[in-house]
Amino acid sequence: MSDSMTILLAASLTIIGAATPLLFAALGELITERSGVLNLGVEGMMLIGAVSAFAGALITGNTYIGVLCGAFAGMLMALLHGYLTLTLMTNQVATGLSITIFGVGLSALIGLEFVGVTVEPLSNLPVPLLSEIPFFGTLLFDHNLLVYLSVALVFGLSFFIFKTRGGLILRAVGDSPESSHALGYPVIKIRYMALMFGGLMAGLGGAYLSLIYTPMWSENMTAGRGWVALALVVFATWKPWRVLLGAYMFGGVTILQLHGQGFGLDIPSQFLSMLPYLATILVLVLISRDRLKLRENSPASLGRTFRPTA
Amino acid sequence: MKNNFDDQEIGQPRLLLQSVTKEFPGCLANDSVDLRIEPGEIHALLGENGAGKSTLVKMIYGILKPDSGTMIWEGNKVQVANPAHARDLGIGMVFQHFSLFEALTVKENIALGMTNPPAMDQLEQQILEVETRYGLPLDPNRAVHSLSVGEKQRIEIVRCLLQDPSLLIMDEPTSVLTPQEAETLFVTLRQLSEEGCSILYISHKLDEVRQLCQSATILRHGCNVGNCIPANETPASMAALMIGEEFEVAQRGEHPEAGPVTLEIRSLSRKSEQSFGIDLHDINLEVHSGELMGIAGVAGNGQAELLELLSGEVLSAADEILIGGESIGHRGSTKRRQQGLCFVPEERLGHGSVPDMSLNDNSLLSGFVSQPFLNKGFIATETVRKFTRQVIDLFDVRCPGQDALAGSLSGGNLQKFIVGREILQQPKVLVVAQPTWGVDAGAAALIHRALLQLAAEGAAVLVVSQDLDELLTISHRIAAICGGSMSESYDINEVSAEDVGLLMTGVSLDKSSTKPGPAQGALQ
Amino acid sequence: MSFSLVARPQPSKLMVYLSPLLALILTLFSGFLMFSLMGIDGLDALYAFFILPISDSYGFSELLVKAIPLILIGVGLSIGFKANVWNIGAEGQLVMGAVAAGGVALFAYESESIWVLPAMMIAGILGGMAWGAVPAWLKTRFNANEILTSLMLTYVAGLFLSFLVHGPWRDPEGFNFPESRLFSESALLPIILEDTRLHIGMIIALLVVATIWILLSKTLIGFQVKVVGSAPRAARFAGFKEKGLIWFSLLLGGGLAGLAGMIEVSGPIGQLVPQVSPGYGFTAIIVAFVGRLHPLGVTIAGLLLALSYLGGETLQIEMGLPQAVTGVFQGMLLFFLLACDVLIKFRINMTQKASKTESVKQEASA
């Protein structure tokens, strides 16, 4: 393989690594928002997921169990969010913020003894034969389980949302909880489920960060990825395949950040580090300026508290 | 009135309710109500707003559970657990406020209303079959937000019919239809009735009940106050039972000598900014001082868009809207208030008032322009309180006090407050949307009288309403809006309800429109 | 027996004030449990967290020092939150205020003029406003969600400050530490209580609180803020400009956060460092909510949350526990507050066995 091919491959693998945690978190948030619930706690859920996954892997010595721990912990946080916003009908914005603040603090507390420790990262599962194709084999068929899973979820969730009755009900609840309730659908229960799926996915995203991407634990290691995931859902106009596109674009921006100076760009590292955040603002602006399009695509009841009165 | 059913006991009723009671905190919504519906019968459930009609049918449909009482369905005692259970039993319901999903297609909406829908292409086939059989044309793949209100109602009906119901509940179905559309609906309902399906028809419109229904149950304040055969009754005898108390009905009086044009709309066109909105086309309208002008129309034909432009929430070109001859189309609400325009929006809670704020604050909300409510930027609390007390006294607003939250008032009392708040600002022009929507009869009469009084004092009053009966009672002149276009306006004495119904469907009448008298010529 | 929520006919005034107290009690209880789970004597730890830090007058003055930025930012944010403008980027606005004020201080390094401080103050306010103006512009012009943009800008601000103290503004005699020069005397806030770090910022904060209080309760603009937040359509009906209020909220919130940033660098810190705030901008969100979005409440909440910082420090010193405990307490406090707030509009019904869906109907429509 030529040098340029090697660099290209390395860059592509970096993109996949940076994109996958975002993809998980954003796909989860997409399902949550489709049900009409705005979860601003993604960042906190990812952090709790990351630290729990790390703890699980460290204690059991099994990275896969670590992954499950991360997912489960994210789900627990979502349950807390749900109890507040769905059962006690608290403001979704304030509750999401408190989940994030709490998650930052609690993960730092739990993770205190893990700082500086490393675990065995999740190993790759090359697809037999296919992975041996030069270049493309490594690019497409030599990844860990979570990368495969994240891409499979894009297709799976697309099918679920647009082709199944469950997906239809989910969209209906997000469009009009009042009508759904009048037709006898258990709005609150459905929203709990969507929210918990979102938490689980945020937890997986966090697990990916602490078990594969770095792989170690450090305080506040998500560095705003939970918020970027929220922006990605808007960018994607609530469609899974566009989340895939957005997440990989962000992976691309990360490349610049990591390798910018390597490419000979004489720019202070801080400015390169700003890129993902500035890019997030840019895509938000680009997609939001068309108010009509945004309104047509966004779940009509997003962020509104629903109280099942008769 | 006697209970007719006791003497005509024939076979098993389709539905029998016995002393059903439902209490909400602070309100006994249904007080041991009885109801009996025969197979194939069109049965009216009559009552004023707030009489407990919706509560009763929600219990039949399983959305609410009764506190006590029994429900017997085709001879078996049942407790309807939820709407799905009701559908399994064979009960279908068409809601007054549709339970539809704007972002989804007709087909998806119908599938959501079925317990076990077939595969999508099969469902489409079934939808088309029902549509041809009952004359309810609808494209299954259209998105709901692109449909008219009448078409939306058809979705609900088709959704019910697909389940082969033996009881169809219709909650105020004609409130969103033109008289002609209502006729078409009646044909469908009669066909269903002949096929053996019972229909529970909720309404407060006595004429259509007499025309359509074979029997009726009348509710007042949550109690069953009588049963009757509508054909044997007069509207007055039924109204007496329904309303129970006497009150002064608004009298329009003669069409006044037309004063100068105070509100004028000149070739107003506007593309809607809402995703599911209606475009307005070349609207022309003149409202003279001293007259009450009514705009009829089925909901969703551009009224919301026109009202936004009139209130100043959305701006137009300067000379598309004029008050007292001055162009104000480009001016915001505050400037318009300074010119003497007051406004009563359709939605009481959250638009005409802030539910979480006191009545005082709600006086300040629209009164700060014309009333001396501000003193160098600071709020003159005592002045606001005085004004609020005046509104409460003059308009008979029943509330715990002026510090009560707007949201805690009943619909009728809040509407009286809002109308009173605007009228006490002595407007030159008052624009009112749906003045008595969901308001009890007493409050409605008071509001009608107040509007006519204001016109008599020289203001130009524009009332936009879906309730044709209301407009025919109070307007001096009337026009209709359809698909974003405004019809010619007519003197109320020159048109019949059917004529206005035609206008509401966009058909122009074959008579020349009447321009009011001499004053207008003098002005121009 | 299952509990159900029953709507109150009128929101309970009592619960509005009782709910934060209840939340605090629940937080203390949970804190006790948490410490016990960590194998620490819960009572000792709570004592070290809540009592020990303010058991002497110096401790109390430190409490005030930490409360100043929290109160300043908290009142600013509470106006935005009332109007449903969710500025959660106050941390970034604080940083930019500190940068602007610090810039003035470094530029006027040689000057002994008494105008240095006022200039810094104005620069700080403008710096924060500028950073608040970006989300306001993006929101009003492009409809971009201010929650996300203001937060993203916080990261950008932090990186910008980091660039400055690592690069152009690094102290030439500072042994390569990423810090600016120490500000000269003329750029430091006067101390108002001897032998403490309590500075004149306390008085500024109180003045701001009083001004905002009057603004909110007595003027039309305060009324507009409340209406826009409570019923946006009613605000349009009344003719209140939503865009204007978005600008107002974000400029005010940003300006006050910038002022807090200026106060931090010219008060307790005295120079520009990579971390000019231990997350005051985020904590102030909690301050605003716990303080019921009311200036007086915010002042009390600011003191309470300042205590959580001091308590965290004390725990670290006394028991070797991490500072992160502070964040956990802050998060818990907000959870419990939000949860307790449900009691303002609803009461708990323990006897009725009915399911919630049917017991809540406020009024029956026909």
Image (cartoon, coloured by chain):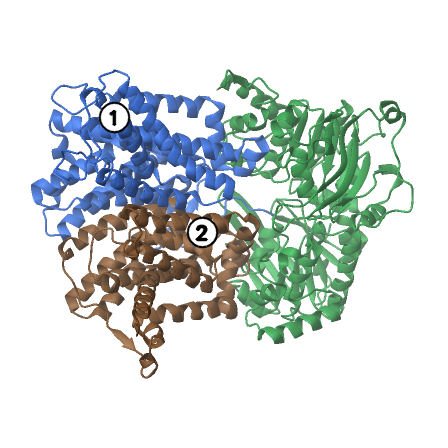
What label sits on residue C105 in the rendered view?
1
Q: Is residue B130 visible?
A: yes
In screen coordinates, is C179 left or right of A17? left
Closest to the observer: C167 or B112?
A: C167
The picture's colour for chain C is blue
Q: Chain of mark 1?
A: C
Q: Residues within 10 Å of mark 1 (few under 14, many from 20)?
A: many
Q: Is residue A44 above or below residue A150?
A: above
Q: How many marks?
A: 2
Q: Nearer the viewer, residue A230 or C165?
A: C165
Judged left or right of residue C136, residue B389 is right
Position of residue C154 in the picture relative to residue B379 (left or right): left
Color of chain B here?
green
Image spot of residue B126 (x, y percent): 66, 73
- Labels 1 and 2 touching (C-beta < 8 A): no
Task: Locate residue B158: give its quadrant.
Answer: bottom right
| Chain A tint in image | brown
Element type where label 1 sits in the image: helix
Disc 1 marks which amino acid?
Ala
Residue B83, given in percent of the width and then of the height, sits at 54, 63
- Residue type highlighted by circle 2: Val
The numbered mark at residue A283 is 2
Residue at figure coordinates x 45%, y 63% from the top left: A240
Q: Chain of mark 2?
A: A
Is B52 above or below relative to B317? below
Tag 2, which secondary structure? Answer: helix
Question: In front here: C70 or B512?
Answer: C70
Q: Residue at x 35, y 21 (%)?
A: C210
| Nearest to viewer (mark 1 / mark 2) | 1
Q: Residue furthest bottom?
A: A129
Q: Is residue A64 above or below residue C81?
A: below
